[in-house]
Image (cartoon, grey):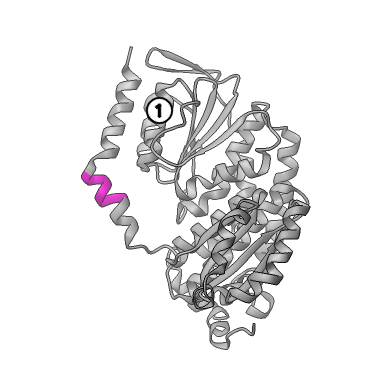
Amino acid sequence: MPLNPKQESILNDKNAILALDRSGLFEEQLCFPDNLRKAVARAKSIRLPNEAKIGHRVVRYGRVKKVAVAGMGGSAIAGDILKDWVGSEVRVSMEVCRGYHLPAYIDTDSLVFVMSYSGDTEETLSCMVDAINRGCKIVSISSNGALRRATETLGLPFIQLPKMAAARASLPYLFAPISQLLAKLGILPSGKVDRNMKATVEVLNELAQEYAVEVPVEKNFAKQTAIKLYETVPIIYSCNPYRSAALRFKDQVNENCKMPARFDVFPELNHNEIIGWEAPNEITRRYSLILLRGVEELPEVRERIEVLKERIFTKKAKSMVEINAQGETKLARIFSLIFTVDMISMYLAVLYNRDPMASEIFPLLKHDITERLGTLKRLEEQIQKLALST
């Protein structure tokens, strides 16, 4: 499909792009590889205590049989990446908890990463209360807010996030501490972590140059793809090792572009989602299809994708784009997809003339309702009582 000259002109105007992005999210996004390098260096110096005392209970940071990441939105995606990367290789269970409570099986043998960029995410604070009551080993990761205050009150490990434009931009600083601490605990081989991180930074450095704002549309895959997705509803499909990248793309389109999107994963989507493509063409022509692909695809999945491309997707969707994972390691390939879809969403926001940070709904949900219900205050009071209990 030929690209639209008007849209090419918009995405080739560097000054207009940066003027729209008043918070500097473009700059932070393109600094992703450097931020990941810095985050790894910082994380290597983190030390867990042997134990911590909460009220009458002593929590020992030794044997870990389960790992949970409690967070919401851009703060939780680090847990999804972790599961995609090593969930099928390690002998501990890994859970990402998006909600007010931890699963019942999270207990004293569990290490719980309580993560909130702002520190004022009520669902995450509620999970922290759960973790305290169950005697879990807790590590908090945040920039400030109620989570920092609660962690300091309890005397638990706290990892400080740098100030950034948004939670989604802080992903390098959210992910690096998790992987490094799991290596220190012997859950992940330290050599594997170091090799994967090094390979990831290398491939992201290359991509950051390719997707830079000053690189014109004709040489910039992220800009080209944004044009193809413009004025459509993106439908994102991946296979399981890249589920986190598909979820990230959906979330980034939602937050940066203020547009709907959806994602699904092979092979499960072959048993339900795919039937939806039998809808009339006047409906499916509103969709663009994005396939996230890589060497981790099983042969059975690859064959089905190729058949569906030929028989269904190219005939039903308005446009179809394949994004191939790059890099020498599995983690590098996952992050190559994530960085690519991040940049596509940023350029798509420009085409919609949207400031990627501005939002009308977030203030309503995160402030008006939370303050009216008094949830954060109540949770902080609960944590204070737990800290003083005897």
In the picture, measured across the screen, residue 236 lies left or right of residue 198, that is left
Q: Nearer the viewer, residue 363 or 270?
A: 270
Q: Is residue 17 magenta?
A: no
Which is the main secondary structure of the residues drawn in magenta?
Answer: helix
Point out the residue furthest to the left here.
372
In the picture, measured across the screen, residue 15 lies left or right of residue 217, that is left
In the picture, measured across the screen, residue 77 lies left or right of residue 204, that is left
Q: Nearer the viewer, residue 112 or 156?
A: 112
- Asked if 50 appears above or below 209 in the picture, the reply is above
Q: Secondary structure at mark 1?
A: helix
Magenta span of residues: 366-372
- Asked if 45 appears above or below 209 in the picture, the reply is above
Q: Nearer the viewer, residue 295 or 387?
A: 295
The reply to whether residue 347 is visible in this rendering is yes
Quadrant (top left, top right, bottom left, bottom right) of the N terminus: bottom right
Point out the residue furthest to the bottom here.
5
Question: Where residue 258 appears, x then y in whole percent?
Answer: 42, 66
Question: Where residue 220 appears, x then y in whole percent?
Answer: 66, 74
Question: Where residue 215 appears, x then y in whole percent?
Answer: 64, 75
Classify residue 327 by image quadrant.
bottom right
- Say which residue label 1 marks: 130
Quadrant (top left, top right, bottom left, bottom right) of the C terminus: top left
